[in-house]
Amino acid sequence: MIEQLRLTCDRLVSHRQLACGHSYCGIPVHGKDIFIYSNTDTERKPLLLTGHHGDISAMTFGQSSRRLLLCSASADYIIVWDVEQCQKRSQEGKIAAGTIVGSLLGDVVHLSFCSSDERVAACSGVTVYILSSEKQEVISALAGHLGPLTSAEFCPWNKHILITTSEDRTFKVWNLETETVCYQSFVLSASPLISSAFLEENRHVIIGSTDGQVWCFSFPDDHKCELVTKIEIQKVERRLHNSQQETLGQQAESVKQLPADEVEISKPILKMAPWSSFTDTTIPERDSSWLCVGSSDGLYVVNVATSELLTVLYFRDYPNLSLSVAGSWSISPGLDNSMVFLVSSLFTPHVVLVKLHLCELEGIWAGDEGFSVFPSSPLLLESPLNVELKKKEANHPKKKGEVKDQPLVFHSVARSSGYASAPRKTMFSPKTNIQKNPFFKKARKNAGLLLKDYPGDSTAPIIPHNHLSIASKPVHCIQYSGDGKQILCGLGNSSVLLYKSSLSGNPAVYTGHDKPVSSVSWSLSRQWWLSASEDRTLRLWSHGSPEPAIIMANSRFTKPIRSAQFYYLDKFLLFASGPSLYLYLYNVDITRDDIKRYQQRSVVKLAKCFTTGSATDITAMSAANDFLSYIVLVCGSDRSIQVFDMNKGVVASKLADPHSRAVHCITQNKGSMFSTQALDSYNLFLTSAVTDGVKIWDLRTLRCVRRYESHLNRCHPCSSAFSPCGQFIVSGSEDNCVKHRQETAGYLSVSAPFKAYVYDIRSSGYLHKLQRHSDTVLSVTFNPATPEVSGSALKGGRPIWEETVCSSPPSFPLNGMHVSN
């Protein structure tokens, strides 16, 4: 950060709105006059603008590129100046004059132009005045807030929409054509709301308060705003500081450590601006969710999509700046890939013009060296994945003097003599009236369906298709088979149900566990599937057999098995128990001796046992089985995510504190056999944690790229899943929207329709709520063959499992959801 200009005023201007553009900046002088300075040539004599009779309280530049307008306000006048015309008149020796567009409107605290500079919004008291920028005309006066207004901003993609914030701690969305309120928020905070901004590419509106909180709301066409995320600057700042210390360890001398005796100050959100307005085409597209936040102690760069703080530029780290605490900010893009700030001091009558080159922040988007889910090198000789299971062949002892059976003829097939058959009475007659068998036609038709690809342009599933209720314990896990024709359900009563994907007919019931089933998994060949339970046992079942082919007893493990699956194209069994990750070879033999049926002929062998780096219990695990991959993702109870390289048999990387709670669900984007995605898409994975929403991560950079928290998850382990096309995400929820109320015996009982949420992977706001469930949706999954999603729900006092499958309508307008790349 470079200080280009330092000005001293005759009075404090810390709480006044100053004007800063890409080429000029403006400050009040002597209370009622204005000096316009050039940002590129600070030595040039400033342009003097006179015309106000009272102290100037607010200024702002226009947004149009055709001509540069400046609007200034005082208690007597609101004047719009054409800067270029004023410069010409000043060079000709004439007095620069502006156009009075408003008079006697009170103490104006905030001004803003619309995107075309045709109208100006002026906040005075509890009223916002919409003025014409060409003549003195009050187009409309909007009043509705209970406290004084603090800011007003026009919607950049709809000039007829205005948003206002107030000290009553709410914001309103106004329709200027009808002069009505489209949306009024609830009370967001205990502190006043003082700033607002729009993210045009994501169609979001951002609200800031004096206590350092930032709210991000979706802004659809109907203007019914939905909360997308909430960020507390002090919390994310503390998290960034801790992560820097853990990354650099004891040698972190370059990390700015806060002194233990330093007084903690508030961090008001004085000004916000989208990062995308400062960047050029060389900056990645992900910067569209970055937000610049000006506070009292420096500049904060926040990623709204992930709710993370990227970097902080403190005033104290730049000794050349004659500024320690800011009172107001004005932010604008520069001319040479830079940002320009006009900052006023809080306690002294100083104003500083600061320039920041974006090359100084290259480290923000330069991600760490990550991994790829696809192998980049062959297997090592000592790799655990090279271990093979030696199959023992049955050795039958030969008897001495035994006479072998010898054939009676020289040919392998002997034709019958025909003496036992009846004599033929009719001669051969050809069949001329042969009807085609409809069965083969139907079979050929069904065979074509097996080769049908998953619709890549399908819309989100929203229409209820089927509903099933079973009086049983809650369903903890569900999974479709690879062809999408069957679905496994692990119940809390220690049994497993196998349904057709249409949920028709009676299910096949498999019993044997003693405690709730925690995990089910299909093999890639769909011949086998396994179930793991809280009773510390794992069972591998064959299709159509009521008895398990393999039983791994609880004597092998000291803690319950949390996650279990097939791995490396069905070569291994991979599961977690306590702090250990087990890799087993297996060979399934379903033949049994009728006398010794209790003896299983299937074989399992431990190939490798891994232990997490911090010896913490594993809470969730994920690995790809549809294709060869060395990567296994493991989540621990210490809130970490560890990346195992199974080729080398080591922990390759570790993410500390990716969530505020331990991760209970981790899911990779594995696609399906019916769909093909871009190779880079398979490097994405999801994590879910209680009270911390769902995050999507990129394995290549080991960074969070987006966060989803519109759903509610406060106590139950609700899961999440990718769609086979990779465009959507579904998550379970504990939504507490009230369905009906019933007052009985002095008590108020509330019944809530719990939901599952469907997100578009490109936007943090949700697309749909699947409102068919009557309780918390624990587990969700997509059908790999068709656009369907299934979810299992939990009943509290009355254990009932409900299954809902939603199919997508062909005419649903996805482009009406306002999602952005």
Image (spheres, rainbow, N blue to C red):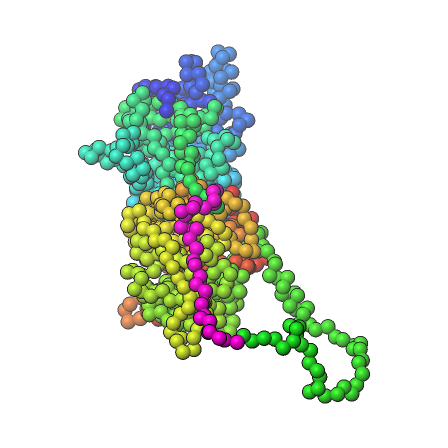
Residue 761: x percent and y percent? 48, 48
Q: Residue at x 44, y 16 (%)?
A: 41
Magenta highlight on residue 350 = no
Q: Residue at x 58, y 51 (%)?
A: 457
Q: Residue at x 27, y 32 (%)?
A: 251
Q: How many marks?
A: 0
- 247 lies above or below 754: above
Between residue 409 and residue 422, name the one nearer to us: 409
Q: Is residue 384 visible?
A: yes
Direction from residue 763 to residue 794 in the image, left or right: left
Among the 4 quarters of the image, the one containing residue 757: bottom left
Q: Residue at x 53, y 33 (%)?
A: 116
Between residue 469 and residue 484, name the one nearer to us: 484
**Which residue reaches farthest top?**
93
Direction from residue 726 to residue 59 in the image, left or right: left
Where's the N terminus, which quadrant?
top left
Residue 231: x percent and y percent? 35, 43
Magenta stretch secondary structure, dominant? loop
Residue 246: x percent and y percent? 29, 38
**Which residue reaches farthest left?**
261
Between residue 800 and residue 188, name the one nearer to us: 800
- 91 lies above or below 137: above
Between residue 33 and residue 246, name the one nearer to us: 246
Q: Is residue 490 visible?
A: no
Residue 341: x percent and y percent? 39, 26
Among the 4 quarters of the image, the one containing residue 752: bottom left
Which stretch did the figure color magenta? 375-403
- 282 lies above or below 696: above
